[in-house]
Image (spheres, grey):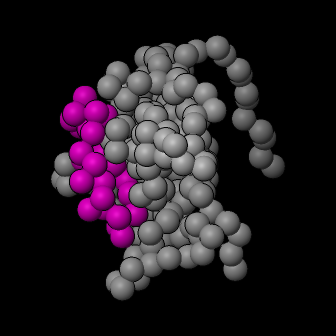
Amino acid sequence: MSTAPDLTIRDWPAADFSAMPLGAGLTALWWLGQAGFAIRFGAISLLIDPYLSDCLAAKYAGKEVPHARMMPPPLEARAAGDVDLVFCSHAHSDHMDPDTLGPIARNNPGCRFVVPRAVAATAAQRGVDPAAIIAMNDGESVDLADGVSVEAVAAAHETLRTNDRGEHHYLGYVLRLGGLTIYHSGDCAPYE
């Protein structure tokens, strides 16, 4: 018989997520807007689909659908320190933000970036050192740190899309953080 984990809600700003003190075995989560999250597991800090700029508003300015943010980013990419892992579910700008990845990579030289293998070159074009990229495909698993692992799951952004090598353009991630499992689907529609 399993028991539900204790849930405590504390007011701690996302801008300081990497400094939040956590007891052993505890995990903290912040919503960053869009599909983005910051997670702390012990001393490990990670980001999922961090869209921390307003690049889409600039890209779609004057268009029928302006893509304005619903809220300001709670964290500045250039100020995000002590980030160990960044997960990008696909290459759309609100998931693999060109104005976010470069500053995070520059400010966190030990950070690793988990991305779909089919779009790994795009992550490099957006400022990530290719040596820091962990490229994954559907069904693959990687141990990332003590007690931290990830499994990639194909995602259908309307439909499943692969390149000529069978590598998926869109992934979801099953994160295992000690005894806690978190699934982030990216932009995934139901599929068989």
Viewer-proximal residue among 182 and 159: 159
Residue that extends furthest to the bottom in the rendered view of this protein:
164
Does the magenta run of residues contain 124? yes
* Residue at 20% across, 55% down: 130
Depth check: 33 or 108 in front?
33
Q: Is residue 25 above or below residue 157?
A: above
When the figure is inspected, residue 168 is found, relative to residue 59, above or below; the finding is below
In percent of width and height, residue 171 lies at: 50, 63
In the rendered image, the vertical position of residue 10 relative to residue 136, given as above or below: above
Percent of width and height locating residue 27: 57, 31
Kindly identify the residue that appears in the image at 25 percent across and 29 percent down.
107
The verdict on residue 3 being magenta is no
The residue segment tinted magenta is: 102-128
Q: Residue furthest right?
A: 1
Q: In the drawing, does residue 11 fall left or right of residue 173?
A: right
Quarter placement of the C terminus = bottom right
Q: Is residue 4 above or below residue 191?
A: above
Query: In this rendering, does residue 24 appear at all?
Result: no
Count of labels in the image? 0
